[in-house]
Amino acid sequence: MKPGYYFWSGDIAAAEGGIFAGCRFYAGYPITPSSEIAERMALRLPQVGGKFIEMEDEIGSIAAIIGASWTGEKAMTATSGPGISLMNENIGLAVMTEVPVVIVNAMRGAPSTGLPTLVGQGDFMQAKWGSHGSYEIISLYPSSVQETFDLMIDAFNYAEKYRVPVIFLLDAMLAHMYEKIYVPSEDSVERIERKKPTKPPGEQLIYEPDDDLIPPMPSIGEGYKIHASGLTHNEKGYPQLTAEAQEKLIRRINDKIRKHAEEIWKVEEYRTEDADIIVVAMGTNARTVKTAVDEARKEGIKAGLLRPITIWPFPYKYIEKYSADYIVAEINYGQIYHKVREYADNKVELLPKMGGELHKPHEILHALRRYKK
Amino acid sequence: MITAKKKSTMELLRDNVESLLRTERFPHVWCPGCGIGIVLNAFLRAMIRAKKDPNKTVVVSGIGCTGRAAGYVNMDSFHTTHGRAIPFAVGIKFARPELNVVVFSGDGDLFAIGGNHFINAARRNHDILVIAVNNFTYGMTGGQHGPTTPTGAYTTTTPYGNPDRPFNIPHLAISLGAPFVARWTTYHLMQLQNSIYTALNRKGFRVIEVISQCPTVYGRRNEMKSPLEMMEYFRKFSVRKDGATFDEMELTYNGKIVVGVFRDVQGIPTYEERYNEIIRRAQK
Amino acid sequence: MRVEIKFGGLGGQGIITAGYITAKAAALHDGKESVFTQDYSAEARGGASTSEVVISDKMINYPQVLHADYLVVMSQSAYNDYLHKLKKGGVLIIEEDLVKLDERAKDFKIYKIPATRFAEEIGNPIVANIVMLGFFVAITGVVSKEAMWKSIEERIPKRFLEMNQKAFLKGYEYGMEIVKKEKK
């Protein structure tokens, strides 16, 4: 894509951001409100020598991108909540076998089929806990079309660097809304590639981590005779079904994210410095909050906005940092609210919405007025 | 001068087979008398005969007894999730068409939980060889009935006999346009090896069903207590008929097993080949 | 300054396209910020259709219409359903052959145009939305004429450009007549 200004939806920006980051493989199954990502990829990937395939379902889609990633390709898929529900078993496989992939989830009203075309934010916990077991994953959530494009590059960089699936959250509002976006020149961004083995085949253990806890990743066809299994395995990649092997492996694949959490955290702090009351909001919903914070400030209320851009690992130090009260405004019946409560010193209030629309500025303002001193 | 005794072809083949195995992982998990090892052996010998580069070959398995095969081959190999070996392999093949991609998995994995992937991958004609080991049961979980258990058979979940109807796998594969479809039993060692050899030299979605014995949890509930009795059954009841009708391919409880190469058609474009044309159009 | 525009009509009238063209004109050709959103609930032709545009000199926070400054309606049902979205004293633009006003209209500044009739005269009722965009530019000045036309050019297939240009200019000139009369 030539550098310059474009007028794109969040879906288009997610697709183009992926391609810009180096993604050359997409497998997916259409589902509202993410289908436009598939459409864009079908159009664009063959133009840049990439591959697009529409699979028979979401389970096949995630399996295909994990397979493709093992060949060395940067691979992604896109879906919404129902699709993530189907993908979760294989998200666990990608976690366990440490495969870099990016999975876009354009959140819609839920549970079940819910509100296919309307906004929701009910999949935060699913992104973290959707597959069985105790694991860490990375999840990012932009609030504008520009940020969607920019953050897709980070998503691929994180996936490659930490050898972990990245769940890239969008919402139905952002997926479908159009805004101006600037595409920078090709060489203006840093693209991180997965670490390659330094030892020759035969000497390199497939799951032998470096000091950063991340093992280098050979590709299929390079002679390393990779063996990867969703079973608990040793550093050779061979199944080892013991408590000791489990302790070593699961601790490491969690710690490789936890120990690098601060490098992964991205947070927007808006007028929080002197705030008595901070609204925690994510994605497009945070845009409403900004308007409300400005209005509240005019009324003498010391309000601020804290927007986690990195949802997982949860940027808890930013919550601990302030001694203000918190309002968590999210389009669900309380998810990030529980994370904020875990780390806040003072009062935490939930301002939920069941889905279908963003909070309105006056709704946030109304809540903020209760904190007028 | 001392001349080393020249090794026989069989000995050479065995040495080479061992080089394709992660022998350090032995003993394997399969029960004494299990047929999966026979199928794996036939596959590896066919690989050697077909001169396929093990460094450019990928073996993908799902879950189950047969699913463990990926763990023993000394090639790039993946033990994935239950039912998902085919779409995982599709991702590999589509990303790197130059690789030789083999799915080695069991009947429950490929046709029950993974059935949707099988039919769609066959329909698209991905360039993948599927070796489907059919032992009529879910062995690893203790012998429950599956999508290939013959009607009337006794399993741990059909204590009064199986009311269910089994898949006719060659019929299914042929109906989806798969260009190479064969069925053998573990008794048909050479024929099986020859079919895998032929299939390794063909393109497209190739399916080889191998009827295999599970004496431990299937045979003993169905009047065949020992591996030998099961092999004996395969020997006595198998009939080779390459031009068999779909009805003849149907398997019945302890009944006739029609084996053979049911379809071998060349020249059908694979998905990967058709996508090259898409890339050409997109870049025009 | 934040300006909010809502378009409403029936599926097939080009309501979504009109919103998209307007928002893109503001963002890419007038150098402003804009957000375009559409209602996905009724995609079938003949069903209700609506799109929203927010334009501002600054970054836009809330992306949708809260209290529309401009409401452009091309069907009776759109008028009935969306009039409450228009703020008091706001500008109401209607397709006069398809929308009958009621007593609620007295709170707004009203501009009328027989956009579909004009489009038919030009050769195809499908360009009624483009007639409307010309009219919208003349009446409101929210988007410049040049920017709007550029945005139309980018959206419409080349072989239909001539017809669309006629439609755009027809709407624009009809609007300018009204504006001139108002100034007198």
Image (cartoon, rainbow, N blue to C red):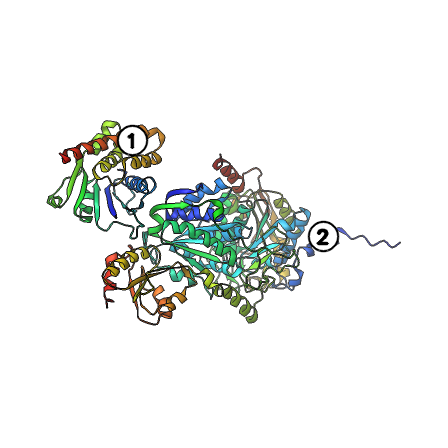
Is B74 placed above or below B27 here? above
Along the line of sight, which residue is nearer the eye, B18 or B261? B18
The answer to whether B117 appears left or right of A279 in the picture is: right
Q: Is residue B247 above or below residue A201?
A: above
Q: Residue at x 47, y 48 (%)?
A: A188
Image x and y of residue C82, in percent: 20, 46
User: With respect to residue B161, does C46 lie above or below?
Assistant: above
Q: Chain of mark 2?
A: B
**SS category of the residue bearing label 2:** helix
Q: Which mark is residue B13?
A: 2
**Camera-side mark, 1 or 2:** 1
Q: Quadrant of residue C122?
A: top left
- Where is the N terminus of chain A found, in terms of image quarters? top left
- Residue A218 to residue A319: above or below: above
Please give the label number shown on residue C164. Answer: 1
The amino acid on which the numbered mark 1 sits, given as a three-letter code, is: Asn
Q: Is residue C9 left or right of residue B166?
A: left
Q: State whether residue C101 appears in this view.
A: yes
Q: Quadrant of the C terminus of chain A?
A: bottom left
Dot 2 amino acid type:
Leu
Residue nearest the observer in this picture, A50 or B278: A50
Residue C74 pos. (x, y %): 21, 39
Q: Do the residues under discs 1 and 2 have CB atoms within 8 angstroms? A: no
The x and y percentages for residue B193 are 65, 49
The chain containing the residue under callout 1 comes to C
Q: Is residue C99 left or right of residue A162?
A: left
